[in-house]
Image (cartoon, grey):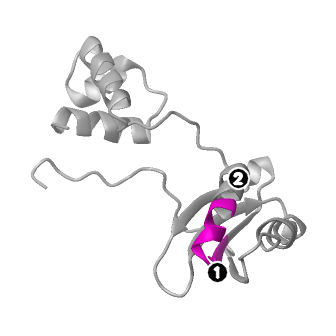
Amino acid sequence: MDEFDRKIIAHIQEFGRSSYAEIGNAAGLSVSAVNERLKKLERQGVIAGWAARIDPNAVGCRILAFVHVMVERPEHEPAFLELVRQEAAIQECHHVTGDWSYLLKVRVADMAALERLLAQRIKALPGIPRTQTVIALSSAKEAAALPLPAASE
């Protein structure tokens, strides 16, 4: 990945709906060069997909919670990870160090939905002896854009 690719990625992270001409202006490239580089970045998996960023409150996902999950034994992980993949309310799942096995980022409509997810879906799985939930009161920052290293790094 060169400096042109970094400029393209930085631009589309902030302005995803830009035309190829606008991206080209930001990166100092022609429309055809932008087209080719975007295709290459997708083939390489650098660009993993395209999506709109939606305001969670606008679509009724008013509760943001972070859930630590303890998975008792390795043989219980496949069922847990399958639930994670299937459950739309679970936005992120991270295998973590420390006292817990996983950290989930969850968005739901209300406390009743959070309780159902925890009690009827997650804790109902075998090998999940406990969870710990932290509810976000507000969010000062949420960013989808990644910090891009400079070419020299």
Judged from this view, the residue extending furthest toward the bottom is: 99
Q: Alpha-carbon neighbours of circle 1 within 10 Å: few (<14), some, or many (≥20)?
A: some
Q: Nearer the viewer, residue 63 or 77?
A: 77
Report, in whole angstroms, how far the alpha carbon at label 1 lies from the one at label 2.
Answer: 32 Å
Res 133 quadrant in image:
bottom right
User: What span is in magenta?
Assistant: 66-79
Where residue 82 appears, as percent x and y from the top left, is 67, 55
Where residue 96 appears, as percent x and y from the top left, is 49, 74
Where residue 28 appears, as percent x and y from the top left, is 19, 25
Query: Quick check: is 98 in the magenta stretch?
Result: no
Where is 94 relative to 54, above or below? below
Q: Nearer the viewer, residue 28 or 132?
A: 132
Where is 8 relative to 104, above or below? above
Q: Alpha-carbon neighbours of circle 2 within 10 Å: few (<14), some, or many (≥20)?
A: some
x 70%, y 81%: residue: 131
Q: Which residue is mark 2?
A: 56
Where residue 31 appears, as percent x and y from the top left, is 29, 14
Left or right of 22: which side holds 118?
Answer: right
x 54%, y 87%: residue: 99
Quadrant occupied by the N terminus: top left
Q: Amino acid at mark 2?
A: Pro
Judged from this view, the residue extending furthest toward the front is: 75
Q: Which residue is mark 1?
A: 72
